[in-house]
Amino acid sequence: MNIKKISKLFFIATLGLSSCNDPVQDNLIQKPNIILIMTDDQGWYDVGFNGNDEIKTPNLDLLASNGVIFDRFYSASAVCSPTRASLITGRNPLRMNIPNANKGHMKDEEITIPELLKKEGYMTSHFGKWHLGTLTKSELDANRGGRREYDKEYTIPTEHGYDHFFSTESKVPTYDPMVYPTHFIKGESKRFGWRGIKDSDSTKAYKTAYWVGENQKEITNLEGDDSRIITDRVIPFIENSLKEEKPFFSTIWFHTPHLPVVSDGIHRSFYKDLDLEKQLYYGTITAMDEQIGRLWKKLEALDIQEETIIFFCSDNGPERATPGSAGIFRERKRSLYEGGVRVPAFVIWKNHLEGGRRIDFPAVTSDYLPTILDILDKEYPADRPIDGTSILGALKGDEKERIKPIGFIYESKVSWVTHQYKLIGDKNLTAFELYDLLNDKSEEKNIIEQFPEVTKALKTDLITWLNSVENSKKGMDYSH
């Protein structure tokens, strides 16, 4: 373990997690089990609970209908790696210099949710896509693993508070994730996807692996639906946590529906009247939905469904040139317009949060960490910028308006989102647009000329925040 890692652990242990002034309501248990589910490239409209009547997501729809659905939930970035960094740290990903997919890595100095929860006696685990660094230096793996120029980006989940992990560096096919066919038939491609491989088909290795430890690969139970393969590891972790009489925390980051989308005949058959692209794309989402339903049924069988809080969201908007949809929202993945960062999301905590509600309170993946600390009645143990805010009040129905704006940076674009407005422009701060998101969800009317004072105020706040992010990138947050 390096000196920076030791210093961070000592820092957390020394400060501890002191109590907040305002206690959580009595009916909120102090140490619930916590599951953070994230899907990959699933658009806002790629679920039934947001009005899509073509795609079949009955389990997600049922959970969402019994929980709190966010009409306005944001991924912290328009692509995957940065959003994942925000989720476990509560901070904008540019603070730790993770600007894009396959760029940067989780830094030892960052304080993560699993590190904080281990201090509270939780068992912690990560399942699925990691994408916050490489998982091996010893062999070629995925996009960066085993390539000497990326050795400094080697960082596995157990270095960041996780007791266990079952992870890939980045994407895999959503069915038979370790292989791809040597020949494609009409409508199939290595980039987009293919029909599930038959026993008689010849295959090639996809050149990635599931890793379970330092220089340790999983070699069994890697055939079939990828979401089922992941869930097969989640359930024993939950059962073991109960045997150990410990609360558990888990991030479950499904690969679905990131390309290549691969679906078996059973799940394609739900969409047999649609074109092949939709059969593959929708089929893999429905297969994942079944596994989320399986997970919930296991919680019920163990009688811990009321002791477990599940957060669900996607990591960004839908990939371009796919059947994925952002609905009425503008643009898609890699854009800071709403369609690139507004994603499907809900929270369910049976008999602790009133279910059957939709809220338009703006929330973001960076809010998870402060919300979890609020639930546990703990404080963030550091004097450094944190970009998220607790949304527990919004989930309980006590808060209707977001006070803390949300800042976004992706490639050459920046945006600043308040409860009502979005200021969006270029990094050079020379060209901006202003939208009223309460009255213009589709961002059709640029109102910057009509509201110069609003624009000026938002731009001033944005510049201050960008300067803060730049200071973080320089390592100034770690000086203590």
Image (tube, rainbow, N blue to C red):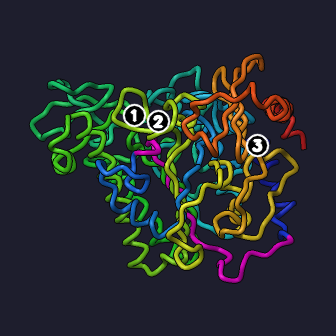
Closest to the camera, between mark 2 and mark 3, is 2
In the rendered view, does 79 fall on the left or right side of 260? right
Q: Earlier in the sequence, mark 2 or mark 3?
A: 3
Are the residues flagged by discs 2 and 3 in contact, CB closer than 8 Å? Answer: no
Would you say the residues marked 1 and 3 are in contact, meaning their CB atoms lie under 8 Å apart?
no
Q: Which residue carries the number 3 mark?
A: 109
Determine the residue positioned at 75% across, 44% down: 405
- Residue 59 location in percent, x, y? 36, 62
Q: Where is residue 285 in the image (x, y as percent from the top left)?
A: 33, 48
Within the magenta stretch, is there residue 330? no
**Mark positioned earlier in the residue sequence (1 or 3):** 3
Stretch in magenta: 21-45
Residue 373 picture quarter: bottom right
Residue at figure coordinates x 58%, y 49% from the top left: 73
Q: Where in the figure is residue 15, as x and y percent of width and height?
A: 86, 60
Q: Is the magenta stretch mostly helix, strand or loop?
A: loop
**Residue labelled with disc 2:** 170
Total marks drawn?
3
